[in-house]
Amino acid sequence: MSKVIDILHKAISKSLAEQTELVREAEEFFLTRFAENVIHQNVGRSDSTIWCRVINGKKMGIARTNELEYDSIVKTIRRAHEISLVSQDDAQLAGFRKSPKGPPSKGYYENTASYPPAERADAVGKIVAIAEKNGLSAGGMFQTSVTNLAVVNSLGTIQEDRVAEARLSMTLTGAEGRAGFAQAFSRDVGRIAVEELAVAACHKADMVSEPMALEPGKYTVLLDPEAVADFLLFLGFLGFSGKGMVSKRSFMVDKIGSKIMSELVSIYEDPEDVEMAYMPFDYEGVPRRKVALVENGIAKGVVYDNYYASAMGAESTGNALQPGNSFGPYPKAMSMSPGNLPLADLISKADRAIWITHFWYLNYVNPMQTTVTGTTRDGTFLIENGKVTRRLKDMRILQSMLEAFNNVEAISLERRVVPKYGALMRVPAVLIKDFNCTAVV
Amino acid sequence: MADIEKMSRIALRKADSLGAEYADFRYEESYFERLDFADGTAEKLEQSTDRGFGIRVIADGAWGFFSSSLVNPREVSRAAELAVAIAKASARINKLVIRLAPKTIARDSFRTPLKIDPFTMTIAQKLDYLRQLDDLVVKADGSISREAFLDFKKTTKLYYDSEGSEIWQELVQSGAGMTVTAAGQGRARASRSYPSNEGLFCSGGWELIESEPFADNIPRLCEEARALLAAPECPSKICDIVLDGSHLGLVIHESIGHALELDRVFGSERNFSGASFATPDKIGKLKYGSEHINVICDSAAVTGLGSFGYDDEGVKAASIPLIVNGILTGYLSSRETADKATVPLSASMVAEGWGNIPLIRMTNTNLMPGRYTLDELIGGVDDGIYMETSSSWSIDDMRQNFQFGCQLGRLIEGGKLTTYVKNPTYTSSTIDFWNSCDGLGDASLWRIWGTPNCGKGQPGQNARTGQGASPGRFRRIKVGR
């Protein structure tokens, strides 16, 4: 038993509550940001958070601290207990559960954990050199981190594991609205191909210049994986959470078993995907498992934590977020199945399409219709007769995401892992018809 | 706190001994409390504490920062070493040397003015308050869904730097809000929130929540939610619009505040939260808005959510004009960017907690009031839409083209409010929009609206900002699709 588990165990033994759970998340990360070809921010942080949840009858109390001394943890348990006593009964409260030990993490790499600041800076130096050689300005970030998660509860759950991650993102910009974006994610920093990415971003920035304004209207669009991930993240919030099923605010309500997207589309919560290698258990200590969300266009299911699973008469899928969050369960490792055509073929087969790198500031306008608005950014192009012919001015879109995923015409063979707001998504590029572009930005 | 002072000395000495040209040490200890109440049940009761320190240095002309939640001399020394090593790594590729604009060295303290410290009240008292609101909603409309919250934060902050500043601050922020939602056929829903979509968020104590007329507004909110459920969709057309102050605060936040952050202007956020069209060559020339538009950055505003005594670079809170009679005159700055752009320090460097480096953030970005009553603003519109309470927002990565939506819309016909319309949205661009303003509400309608969740930076940082606004009238705006 590790020292952390030992302390959590001892502290739980002092709890006066009927059930007690302690979650400890520790993270050490380093992040180098660059812009205008210089490093303008370079930071590191070491932090730990301990959440305590207690249950007395049908009442729950939650307290949190980042003071790791034994006395502080015991004090936090006492605080959670006191809060629970003045709380109200929650008829839906199911109680904690004993979870079996999860499979060991496949997401820890020592070389990522110990990656030094000088190597991150040198990597940025390589990107800057490529940008300068091409008359471009480089901006972006390079992050390496390690997260340790431990969950212990009074029913006998004991989980502890760790994952590492490396992320590199860059935008290379130049005159006349030239912009190229590239990003990569890996648990193993050694697999981040720094120069290859910089060359790819350069290539996009240099593809064609003199941006043209395209009349607003409905177009066929080719969404890069990053743009597909922007949509998937929102679909996760609006539909793939068990909380939405309970509150009847999910587009999946009454749709399980029905066709909601093109038959070309299959989306899974897949924490065991080798490229994502997600933490093998959630913040309640429940082992994560693969969940079919949409299969061949048919709505199949949503993800659950213990609370919402109980409310729906289902089993937790291991998708609890941090204790006390207001989102409910969320799919953190979504995987969209690939198609059978290389991206180059999707381009060459398009008669006329807008190629979108990714979106910015998406926000929902009508959640039940999954309608969002936002703008394109960092490289928007016109494809004509199978060739990229013009750089376009960015456009505002107003689009139902379900409608878009219903209008899928083709999906690329290649996929990329895209990290966004704590979630990972492994996604392909997608060709979609009748996509609504409402204004030139 | 004597221990913290000792640790600050360890940090600053260590950084100096390793060759840092500049160093600052910031310790923060925060207490949070959040209570969520929905449909008669306390959904969430949470208390939390958080503490730690951060060391920021300039070495070989470049920035380095390291922070830790382990508050002991050994960790402080390790953090100082890492911060200097990180800075020296940055310097390997940087060709420019960081320079800081001069500031006044301060040995001072500041405490948020308040009457009732919310942390002296019990959870039971706060739950009673929420329960009473819930009962009033049930009394007004027995079948409407309701949510309410209370949110409190107290931060003790100690700041020391190698230039000699020593600053102690205690900042208290209080929040409360409510939303009612009427459900109709199928998936139809209509919500109304009070006093804004974010609720009430301000610097101060429980007295500010007590003085907010939540109870008085409950019947109106329920009636409006029901009316919106049955209302037609907002029409699509080009027309005049009148916006309530809470929503206009969000437009100020997105299209003025963010656009005038100098780090963004200089490209620091280009790869993430975007850049800005408002480049420094436009200062004194750009007609940002009509003559009615006067905007200040005011980190000293009483009760503003973005208020403090000193920012996280130890710069004293200040009031800086950003737009005067419609002309761009200033920016939100840091010591580094103020030197680069030769503009005044605006005391705008704020970090989310001890674990993050300070970034240029909005403090309170205040659009000063005009001279009209709400009736006069509406009375000046023959055919238009009145919109209230933000529901959706999106702006491009240069802070120009935007689309906003509101919870409530009402047609304005012949200078009078008439039919309710649902899902009102409008699209415009920053300069066109602010230049189309021909009237703002008077001082009696003006307040600083709090935004508790402004995101920026990598790693992502959440800031709490204020936006002063009264209602405003805008001519010939594209409404709907």
Image (cartoon, rainbow, N blue to C red):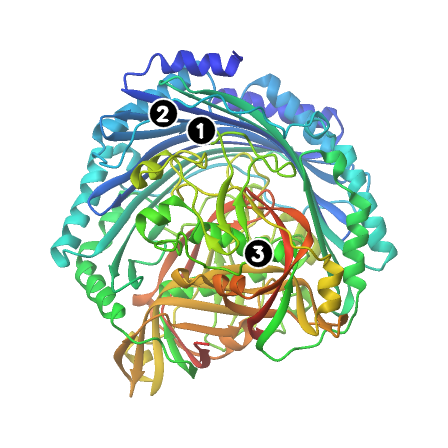
Q: Relative to the observer, which residue lies in front, A359 or A314?
A: A314
Q: Indicate which disc, 1 or 2, sits on the residue closer to the N terminus.
A: 2
Q: Relative to the observer, which residue lies in front, B435 or A98?
A: A98
> Label 2 belongs to which residue?
A97
- Distance between the alpha carbons at the discs numbered 1 and 2: 9 Å
Label 3 chain ID: B
In which quarter of the view is residue A124 placed?
top right
Q: Relative to the observer, which residue lies in front, A174 or A151?
A: A151
Label 1 chain ID: A
Q: Position of residue B170 (x, y in %)?
A: 41, 36
Q: Position of residue A171 (x, y in %)?
A: 71, 55
Q: Are marks 1 and 3 in contact (CB under 8 Å)?
A: no
Q: Are marks 1 and 2 on the same chain?
A: yes
Disc number at residue A376?
A: none
- A173 relative position to B343: left or right: right
> Label 1 belongs to which residue?
A286
The image shows residue A153, relative to residue A253, as above or below, that is above
| Label 1, residues with CA under 10 Å away: few <14, some 14-19, many ≥20 | many
- Distance between the alpha carbons at the discs numbered 3 and 2: 51 Å
Disc number at residue B332?
A: 3
Amino acid type shown at disc 2: Arg
**Residue located farthest toward the right when viewing the structure as drawn:** A133
**Residue located farthest toward the left when viewing the structure as drawn:** B139
